[in-house]
Image (tube, rainbow, N blue to C red):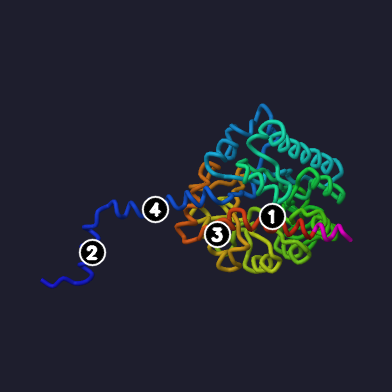
Amino acid sequence: MIVTLRNLLLACCILLPAPIFAASEQDLLERAHEIHDRVMTLDTHVDIPFSFATSEHDPAVAEAQVNLDGMEEGGLDAAFFIVYVGQQPRNEEAYRLATADAVAKFDAIHRMTEYMYPERIGLAQTAAEARALHAEGKLVALIGIENGFVIGQDLSLLEDFRNRGARYMTLVHNGHNDIGDSAQPRPQFGDQGPEEHGGLSDFGFDVVAELNRLGILVDISHVSRQTMLDATAHSRAPVIASHSSITGVADHPRNLNDEQLLALKDNGGVVQIVAFHPYVREGGDATVQMLVDHIDYAVDLIGIDHVGISSDFGGGGGIHGWNNALETFNVTLELVRRGYTETDIGKLWSGNVLRILEQAERIADELQAY
C-alpha cells in the first residue's frame, strides 16, 4: 500500500491527542489574560444618564453596561464618561438649558470620584494623572463632551468646561449646530439639507482654535465629512474620532472614509473604533471579530499609532462579545488571535489616546505662553 504524504499527515492529525490542541488554545488564553492585566484599557466613550451618581443610579452597582463593579471584574481600567446633551432648536433658551444640563453631568462625575467612591476611581485631567491613578490600582475617569451645542454661541464656556475636567469635545451631534455640519442632519431642528455651513462655520474655526488653546481635544465623530476635514486641517493639536468606525468595512455616514483616515494620520490624530452595531456591520448584528476587522483595516491604512477602541456603552453601543464592561477581555483576546503584540495592544487600548492628550497639553502650554 502506498502511503501519500497527505494521508500520513491526516493520520497523524487524527491520532494526535486532543490535549495538544487544547494546550495551544489555553496558551493563547493565558497570554491574552496576561496582556489584558498589564496594559491600561481605556474606553473613550461611555454615556451616562442624568440620574448618574444619585440614589437612582449608583455608579458602582447600577444595572448598566458600565459600572465600577463591572469595570473591576472585566478589566476595563479607564473610561471617558460623557457629558452628552442632545440637539435642540437653536435659540437662547435651548442654549441655556443645554449648558445647565452639561453642568449637571459634570457635577455627577465629580460626585462619583470625589464623594461616593474616591477610593476606587479617580478623575484624571491630564495623561500623567491617568497613568498615576492606574499605577495606584484605581479605576480612572476622564470626561468628554458630546455635542458642542452645549456652548451655544458662547466661546467663553469652553474654559469653564475645561476647568470642570473636559478633555475632548465632539463638535456636533445629530443635527447641524452653530459650529458646523453634522453627518446626520435633523429636519425637526430646522436642518434644511446635508449642509448648512459647508463644513465648519466661522464660529467653528474659532471653537477649534480655542479648544487647542485650552488643551481640549477636538472630537470629529458625528460631524460631516467636510466639517471633519476642515477641523482636522485647522487644528494645531491631534484630533480624535472618539467613537467612529470605517466606511471601507461598513458604509455608514457616521464612519470615516479613506480620505478622512489619511487626513487624520497627517494630523497625528486617532480614530477610536466603536462597538456600535450599525457602524460595525451593515444590516445585521455585529461581533467582536467584526469590530477587529475595522481595527485591522484602519491599522493597515494609517498605522497602529492612529487607532484605538471605544464602546459607546450607555448610548446604544454594544455588540456580541462586548456588550458591557464585564466582557472587555474578549476584545483583547481577539487582538491576540489576530497576531497583535502586547505593544500594539497597549497602543490600541490607551497608549495612542494618552499620547495625543499629552500633545494637546503641550500645544496648549505653548499657545498660552504667547
Q: Position of residue 336 (x, y in %)?
A: 47, 57
Front disc: 1 or 3: 3
Amino acid carrying mark 4 in the image: Asp
Q: Is residue 203 magenta?
A: no
Q: Which residue is mark 4?
A: 27
Q: Which secondary structure type mostly characterizes the magenta part of the structure?
A: helix
Q: How far apart are the two marked residues, 2 and 4, measured between alpha carbons?
A: 24 Å
Q: Position of residue 286 (x, y in %)?
A: 51, 52
Q: Which residue is mark 1?
A: 222
Amino acid carrying mark 1 in the image: His
Q: How far apart are the two marked residues, 3 and 2, measured between alpha carbons?
A: 37 Å
Q: Which residue is mark 3?
A: 343
Q: Residue at x 61, y 67 (%)?
A: 302
Please report whichever mark, 1 or 3, sits nearer to the chain's N-terminal start: 1
Q: Which residue is mark 2?
A: 10
Tag 3 secondary structure: helix
Front disc: 3 or 2: 3
Amino acid carrying mark 3 in the image: Thr
Q: How far apart are the two marked residues, 4 and 1, measured between alpha carbons?
A: 40 Å
Q: Going by the image, does 257 lie left or right of 156?
A: left
Q: Residue at x 53, y 55 (%)?
A: 291
Please report whichever mark, 4 or 1, sits nearer to the chain's N-terminal start: 4
Q: How far apart are the two marked residues, 1 and 3, measured between alpha carbons?
A: 30 Å
Q: Going by the image, does 188 lie left or right of 292?
A: right
Q: Position of residue 213 (x, y in %)?
A: 82, 57
Tag 1 secondary structure: loop
